[in-house]
Structure formats: structure tokens, C-alpha cells
Amino acid sequence: MAGLALGQAQRSIDVDVFDAGEVKAIPVTLEGFTGETLALLKFDLFVQGFEFVDKAKAQFTIKGSNAGRINGAVYDHVKRGFILNKRYQGGSLRRQAHTFANNAVEAITGSPGIGLTKIAFRQFHGRDTEIHVADFDGHNSKRLTHDNSIAAGPEWTPNNDSLFYYSYRRHNPDIYSHNIHTGVRRIVARYSGSNISPAVSPDGRRVAMVLSKAGSPDIWAASADGTGLRRLTTTKEAESSPCWSPDGRWICFVSRASGRTALYKIPANGGAMSRIRTVGAFNATEPNWSPDGKAIVFTTMRGGGVFEICIVPPGGGNVEVLATGEDPSWAPNSRTLMFTSRSRGKRVLSVLDVPTKRVKT
């Protein structure tokens, strides 16, 4: 991923993403909240499959107050009783509100919310790009790198303590790991040629990457500190965009080995690569494997240079088009996607709730 990455702040949510567009949003009404807190709750709930309706049509009422701290409750109109009633303290009001949204989502759906998830992305500074981190809704953005060059491809470690990315700070694309708390940065791969597209394994112990040290860009894997380097692909064509299966057994990537840009997978410990069929979509790029293992999201380009976000089963098959955009990345719930789209000629971050196909920009 060259654009953005989402931190794995919560465990996976078991959602059948292949019912995309057929799932109705959960009707709720909000009462008592005002200002920034109200806007925050609407964002968190909307991108996780909720819609806001009049109280007479609501299945749940989410109510409370935000005068100095968050008091929040959820009333179930079917069961005719409260399923959540809690007072929050400590931390900022925004963090309390995100926590309440998470609790409300779990109380209603049985699955953890994603409001406290962090995102990492590249942002332009003139002609350069630097790595930034922010809350899931885009607030509290902080600049991580000051390389005055091109930095891209941020990838979180599982514990969200560090990011892997590549940077041209020494006039060659090299891969770094960067502790976001201490600021300590170290080299993971600095070989002749390109060192790009780091992808951290689900257990955080290994990193896949694209290196051209042997000629054409190939997929390589190493320990997270860069030792134990092993070449996985040996084609004459360029490979790109590695990502891991959630069980750590496979690496999905992009190759032109068949003469056309397509998705492939290879055992993480080495072996034969095999193509992932994407029926109905050509020129598949930028794969990202869902945390629950059920789907691979990717980008394809249609006629006229239009990019679309699609999903396909990991074993290949018919694809489903979700939205117009590129650089897709799964949230920890395997339901919500963040991607980049164009609005008024500018690239902006957008959020998609896959089952309902609703987009928030």
C-alpha cells in the first residue's frame, strides 16, 4: 500500500462481506448530544452500518450528554429496555465519545467498534510526501516524518507501536521501521535499487517487501529487523504490493507474470506462486487481505482511467465492485474500508461500509 494503513486496534469482526449492498443499515436515533460530540458519534456509527431516523422508526435510541464528560446509553425498542448505560471519565472528551460509540456498536451488534483505530497515510508537502498518523475520523493528525523527500507505503505493526514505510531521504527508496512513541527509526532494507512496499506479518515477526537488488522487482521476506532475507519470486516481470493473509501463511501480491497485471499468492515460506482469478475485473492492483480472511480488496482500472474498489474471495472468483477510488485498506472489523477518492480535483480519504455500500467522505 502506497497510500494509507489502518491500525489493528481491535479484534476481527465476523462479517460476510459478500452480501455487499444487500444489508440494510440499522435505524437509530440520537438524543441529547451536541456539537462536536454529536458529529463524532454520527461519523463513527454511519461508517459501521447505522442510519439516523425519526424516533418512531428507530430500532435503538442512543442517548446521553456531553457536558464535560460523556454519559451514554442505548435503549432497545424491541426489547423495551436499556442494553447499555455508562458514564465515562478520563482522557479527552473525543476519546470518551469514540469509546462510547465502540460500546454502543458492540451492545447492538455483538462486535467491537473501530472508533479508536488509528490511520497512517502520506500527505503532500509541496513536492514531497511525509507520513502522518491520525484518528480514524481524520482528527488529531500528526506528522511523523520530516524527510523533505518522498515517504510512502505506511504499514502498522500489530501492536500499533511502530510503522514500516519507505523513504527517499538518502536519495534511494529504503525501508524503515519507526517507533511512533519514541521516534526511534531504523533501517530494515537498504540495498542497491528499489526497497519499497513493506508489509508486516500478522504476528509482527516478519516483513514482506519489494526489492530490485537481483534485477527486476521481486517479492522478498525477512525478519522484522531485516535479517534472514529470502527471495520468494523469481519472475522476469515486476512484482509489487505484497500483503499477508491473516493466518500468516500466504502473501498476496501483484505481478505481470501472465502478461497482464493480476493478483497472485505465494506461500510465505516459499513455494510456487498461483494466480487469483478476478472474474470481471482486469489490471488488478493494490490488494489488501481482510483480517477475517474472507476477502481480498483491490483496485482495478476501468475505461477512461477510472479506478474502482473491488473484492474477491481469496481463492479467486467473481468480483464485486464497491466504489470508485483506489488505495483500499481494511479496518480491523473486516467490514469498513478506507480508501482514497477524488473530490473537486483533489485526493481525499473516504470510508466505505461494505455491507451497505455507503460511503463517507
Image (cartoon, helix red, strand yellow):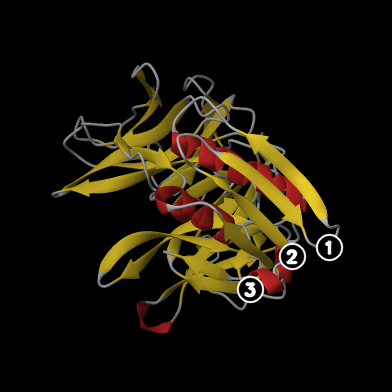
* Viewer can see residue 209: no
Give the labeled residue for mark 1. 78
Measure the alpha-carbon separation of dots 3 and 1: 34 Å
Earlier in the chain: of badge 2 and badge 3, it is 2
Count the labels in the image: 3
Tell me which residue sits at (70%, 50%) in the image.
74
Outermost right residue: 79
x, y percent for residue 97: 52, 41
**Which residue type does callout 3 highlight?**
Glu
Given contact means CB atoms under 8 Å apart, are the residues at marks 2 and 1 in contact? yes
Give left or right: position of 250 versus 157.
right
Dot 1 alpha-carbon crowd within 10 angstroms: few under 14, some 14 to 19, many 20 or more: few
Earlier in the chain: of badge 3 and badge 1, it is 1
**Which residue type does callout 2 highlight?**
Gln
Looking at the picture, tell me which residue is in the foreground, 103 or 36: 36
Measure the alpha-carbon separation of dots 2 and 1: 7 Å
x, y percent for residue 325: 43, 68
**Which residue type does callout 1 highlight?**
Val
Give the labeled residue for mark 3. 320
Earlier in the chain: of badge 2 and badge 1, it is 2
Q: Residue 32, labelled with which disc?
A: none
Give the labeled residue for mark 2. 59
Q: Mark 2: which secondary structure?
A: loop
Give left or right: position of 92 versus 106.
left
